[in-house]
Amino acid sequence: MENTLTVSLLDTNILVYANNEDSPFHIICKALVEKAISSQMRAAIAIQNLIELYAVITDKRKVEHPLSPLKAKEIIDFYKDQEAIQRITPTSQTFNTVTELIAKHKPKAQSIFDYLLVATMIDNGVYEIYTANSDHFKPFSPTIKTINPLKD
C-alpha cells in the first residue's frame, strides 16, 4: 500500500516500465504512475530520472522498440508538466552530500549515479524510493527506504 503522507521518488526503472508496453512490469508500474498523477500518493521525480528515462527509451540496446527523440521528449514533457508530481533537482549542497556518500561507501563505476540520486533525494527531503533495484539502495538504509512494487 502506498504511503500518502511521505513523498516517494519514482526511480527511472519504474518510469521506463510504465512507458514500455513490452515490459512484463508495464501494468504494475503504469498503475503506480497513475496513482502519482491522480494525487493518490505523494510522488517526486528527479531531473536525473527524466534524463535517464530519455536515454533508456531511445536506446535499442535497452528496450525492444526504442522511441524517436521527438516521442521521448513528449514523454519527458508529460512528466515535467504533471502538477501532482514534485520535481527535484540537485541543490547547492548536493555536491557535498554526494562526496560524503562516496567517502563513506566507496562506490564504483555506474553505481555513482545512484549516489547522486540519493544525494539529491536527501537534499530535497525525500527519503523513500519506488524502484525495481532495491539492492542498489541498500547502502543507504535506514535513511532511504526502498519499496519494490514488483516484489512487495
Image (tube, helix red, strand yellow):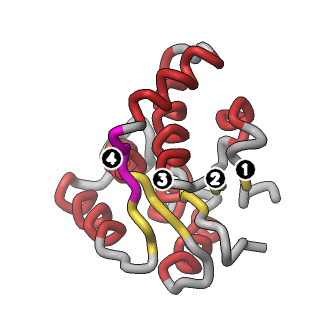
Q: Which residue is mark 2?
A: 127
Q: Which residue is mark 1?
A: 145
Q: Magenta span: helix, strand or loop, mainly?
A: loop
- The magenta region covers 88-92
Q: Nearer the viewer, residue 93 or 46?
A: 93
- The crowd level at tag 2 (other Cα within 10 Å; few <14, some 14-19, many 20+) is many
Q: Position of residue 90 (x, y in %)?
A: 37, 44
Disc with the residue nearer the chain's start (3 vs 4)? 4
Disc with the residue nearer the chain's start (3 vs 1)? 3
User: What kind of residue is marked 3?
Assistant: Asn
The quarter of the picture where residue 94 lies is top left
Instruction: Reply above or below: 24 against 143.
Output: below
Quadrant location, the N terminus: bottom right
Q: Which residue is mark 4?
A: 51
- Where disc 1 sits, the SS reads strand
The quarter of the picture where residue 92 lies is top left
Disc with the residue nearer the chain's start (1 vs 2)? 2
Separation of residues labelled 3 and 2 (CA atoms): 9 Å
Q: Position of residue 87 (x, y in %)?
A: 39, 62
Tell whether label 2 touches label 1 (CB within 8 Å). Answer: yes
Q: Which residue is mark 3?
A: 124
Separation of residues labelled 3 and 1 (CA atoms): 15 Å
Disc ID at residue 80:
none
